[in-house]
Amino acid sequence: MMHGVGRVRILLLLFPCVVGMASGCGGGGSKKSKIWVYQYPDFYQPSLKRVAVLPFANRTRVAGVGARISDTVSAILTNNGTYEVYTRAHLKDILAERDLADAGIIDGDVAIEIGRLKSVQALVCGVCDRYETATKHETRYRPEAIWGRNQQGQAVITGWRQVPYQWTRHDGFVECQVVVIDCTTGRQIAAVRQPSNWWASGSPPKYGPADAVRNAEQDQVARIARAIAVTRSRIKLKGKVLRTATDLYDQEWDWQKEILPSDEHFSVVVKLPAEADRNNFKITVVPKDRRDVVVEHAFVWSKANERQGFRFKVGPIVEKFGFGEYQAKLYSGPEPIARYTFKIVEER
């Protein structure tokens, strides 16, 4: 997998982990194609190297929740490798001196001071607002056969009755508000508020209320970490990832699957989801069923585009390889993730 930041320290993050790799490809991009990408927070810059995680304030009825969640976030960020992470232990003296052990979201002046004293570029701080369970019971009914015998003495269903049973659902809810503060300017550069809900249901459910809230806590930690760090994720490609066009008029592509020498140029148009932002890709054009690379182009995708076209000259391709079928291939690693077949044909 090529990626644009060049940070070999960035590791696969988070629990529950995503495992395995798929490199599905098909004509123009199969709806089932999935690829691995590095997902970048909007605020992220390679120059941001050192962050500190302050203990989250606890506004729930469960003691110690804020500190536990912030410590887990800190540990995951440390293992992820995007940043050098200053933990609560690194900040012990300044937290005690300024009574910040349960401060929640601090103001910009304090962030600037911590940054100056600890050589930290950004602070992660927050508040845990919700940590609770809820259980719901319902009486439901399932059909049950009534059996009897026919005139031949065979067992047969003679009717149905509705039998009541108890259905139960346990929900766990965890919600934290987290911000990232730039220690140079004192400004918030990111805010995360993504509530987590994990539930189990059944008669009885396989998991209890404690399991539900524990899993919701894990999901909340994962959401916070994904919003702050560069993470590796598998995303789905949808629709036609690759197509060929001869020109772009008023933001509309002139789609053509047959290219003429008189067109002079053609574009291989790529469509990728926003999650592919800042990742490296490569296009190659080859004669169909051959390995000779006609042209290739490497690029970094931007989520500012839904589609982006890459222009190639027709003449040099025809001179070297002639008329016939060609295939455009899109790569994000060693194997193509999408293919598109087109023709270069003689003038009609």
Image: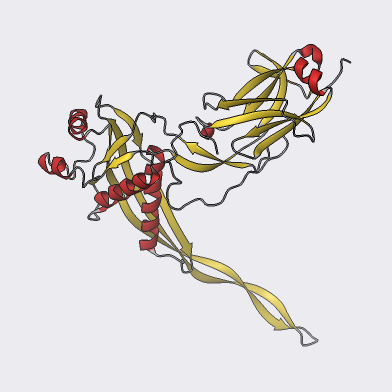
The location of residue 107, given as percent across then percent down, is 20, 31
Q: Is residue 175 left or right of residue 243?
A: left
Q: Is residue 178 left or right of residue 27?
A: left
Q: Nearer the viewer, residue 270 or 331?
A: 331
The location of residue 232, given as percent across then percent down, is 48, 42
- Up-down relation of residue 21 to residue 266 (above or below): below
- Up-down relation of residue 345 to residue 60 (above or below): above
Q: Nearer the viewer, residue 245 or 65?
A: 245
Residue under the image location 77 percent in, 88 percent down: 153
- Up-down relation of residue 294 to residue 331 (above or below): above
Residue under the image location 20 percent in, 35 percent down: 118
Residue under the image location 59 percent in, 36 percent down: 332
The location of residue 149, given as percent across then percent down, is 73, 84
Asked whether the viewer can see residue 259, the reply is no
**Residue 327 placement: quadrant:** top right
Rendered-image quadrant of the C terminus: top right
Q: Nearer the viewer, residue 179 or 199?
A: 179
